[in-house]
Image (spheres, rainbow, N blue to C red):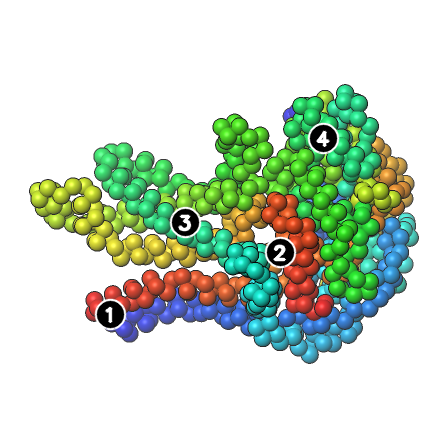
Amino acid sequence: MRETNMKKILISLLFLLFGTSAYADCNIKSGSINILANDFPALRTFVETAKGCKGSADFKVTHSSEHNKIAVPALTANPSEFSARIAANSSIVPLMNQDLIRPLDDLVKKYGKGIQDSQLITIDGKIMAVAFMANTQHLYYREDVLKELGIAVPKTYEEVVAASEKIRASGKMQYPYAAAYKAGWNLAEEFVNMYIGHGGEFFKAGTAQPSINNAKGVATLNMLKKLAGLSNPDYLTHDSEAIKVEWESGNVALMTLWASRSGTLLDDDGDAKITAATKLTGPATVAGGNIPAATLWWDGFTLAKNRSDADAEATFRALAHAAANKKMVADAADQAVWLIEGFKPGPKSIGVIEAVKMKAKPYPMLPQMGLMHGALGSEIVEFLQGKETAEQALKDVEAAYMSKAKEQGFL
Amino acid sequence: MPNKTFFWFFLPTGLAMILFIGLPIISTGIQSFYAQHDQVVKEVKKCDPFGCTVSIVVDQEKTSKIREEKPLGKFNGFGTYFDRNHLAIEEIGKFWNETNSFGEFVDQVTNLPFYKALIFTLTYCLFVTPNVLLLGFIIALSLNAVTRRIRGPLIFGTILPMIVTPLVGSLVLFWMIDAEGIIGANLQMLMDDPYLSLKSSKTLTWITIIIYGIWHHSPFAFVVFYAALQTVPQEPVEAAIIDGASRWQRVRHIVLPHIYPVVTFVALISLMDNFRVFEPIIGFSAEGSAQSLSWLIYDNLVNEEVILFGSAAATSMMTIVGIAILLAPVLIRTWKEFRTAR
């Protein structure tokens, strides 16, 4: 294992060396670049590629899984601590709400050569972000286990439940299903996926009034509870990392997990047998619906408003270089589903591509969605623990959301 | 010390306290009375790699104008304090009228986030504080009786829980009680229940956190008690031995009265600390089953993508009031004793 790690380090070093020399022609003469980003391999590759063209500009980057907690305060300061923030559907919203990011139209026109139109996030006709990768949660399955028990690859959550029950009955695994049900953001995300799969709407059309306390909401909760019953009893403490570990120790045969995690599941570390039997498939549908019970996510870069134009220009040029980089996309093809021209999807991209084909909906980019997500994360826990009815839990979610939305001026 | 000397002696500390504790509390207090301005939203077209939709965004032009006029936000009075996520005055009134039995009413009220958190916080205080005092005292007494030679290493071992960072301490225990951890797996075997999970059951999570709290805080009580035990005069103890007093009688009638002020001090500090219980909830990932007041503040500040300053400020102020109420009996008593002593 040490040897493979050494190899990896060597290869990345070589890549860096050659990468830098090959792309040092962006000709950025001045300015300072400081990027805030989440921490996973694809984003590191992306930022590293941007760094390759920094020229004589000052270049700094902060990769942190706590990026959401830093972003708003850091960008509110004037001048802002960061000149760019790598955001996603949900995390761009607070930046928009507080007016912390700048439109990119002029910069895209001037330096955006090679960026495809489909990468542009436009809001009210203005380009606010440039996306470079897509993500979603989809099913992973253990081919060997399913084959042995004669189970077809599940396409719906009802089939997932049936398959898990069969695996449990066979005595092979006690908790055959896993998903990130950790109370808080993760659990709420699972609700959002399942509710969208049921065709639910979170708000009354055109308003910030919640509308989840309905038959679809109840069905969503009941399905989540069924799945939770087939998971490790500690599911309320399990985030994506924890279920990844469960999977790698061979305790799980069916799992809903982020596409961006497939890289670490399928790498050389861990039990080779499990890795070889780990297969990816599209997200499942639920309750006879057509669209998958999953949300589509994009990751893209935004530029801080409270930062000088010169810094914004330098930052944009470096990041745009990465966002239209065919070489990066070819070299790191299995790290992410890139939205950049020249990307040839490999076996690790199946989940996202299937999701797009099945017309999965993007995560709702609404100003008040964060409050709803927060309320869901804490108020549906008691239902899963069996302490509350589904109707009561949904009523609690709506009430908790309304108080927060009133305080934030949405109602 | 003459009052004047005391004043100059205390001045730097006092100034720092006003600057770093007093003013922030006042600012938090002011913040808690304000809410965000009404959001002006408009419908726009949004396009991303997955297609275009018409949906709403915050209208920045209009919003920034309102914000400039009143940067603090909209005055809300006690609105945030009384809303559903805090004291929930309106909801409680409704529950009172709608529920048929008192039990049902209590169920409904404890389902509200603030009361849920308050009940956990108080339960934690109520169980941890006395046990910490008791355990700390017993350890101090026992260690005081051991031969001097091995006392040093023993003391070090005893205060270890306090040296370990709370988060690390709770994480270690968290992994041990995992369904596949050493304690969790053995408990499942003992109870013959493969679905037993310390982490998913609310009661068991509470018990775990409380035991962790006792483990973590006892060394503090022990250190203070041990120091106090060194000051117990030997003459009355020896006299008591000659009079035939048992060990328990000596502790009850000589040692305890002597170190009584220190007990009060430790009780005060413990109560204050325990009322702000926070780290174990994060360490044990127990957000689902146990929320404390401090955790509510944390939740409002970082767990949402939108930061709820008003909510967090209101909960902070109520935590301060809560601590004041808890400490009041002890403080009043100390004050009375101080007066009579003079």
Give the Cα separation between the discs numbered 4 and 1.
Answer: 72 Å
> Residue drawn at (80%, 55%), measured in percent from left and top?
A201
Numbered label attached to residue B127:
3
Q: What residue does disc 2 label?
A: B302
Q: What residue does disc 4 label?
A: A165
Q: What residue does disc 1 label?
A: B339
Amino acid type assigned to the residue bearing label 2 in the image: Val
Q: Position of residue B323 (x, y in %)?
A: 43, 62
Give the Cα separation between the discs numbered 2 and 3.
Answer: 29 Å
Q: Nearer the viewer, residue B61 or A402?
A: A402
Marks 1, 3 in one chain: yes
Marks 2, 1 in one chain: yes
Marks 2, 4 in one chain: no
Chain assignment, label 1: B
Q: Is residue B214 left or right of residue A210?
A: left
Disc 2 or 1, which lies upstream in sequence?
2
Amino acid type assigned to the residue bearing label 3 in the image: Phe
Residue A159 visible (yes or no): yes
**Residue A100 in which image quadrant:** bottom right
Q: Nearer the viewer, residue A198 or B287?
A: A198
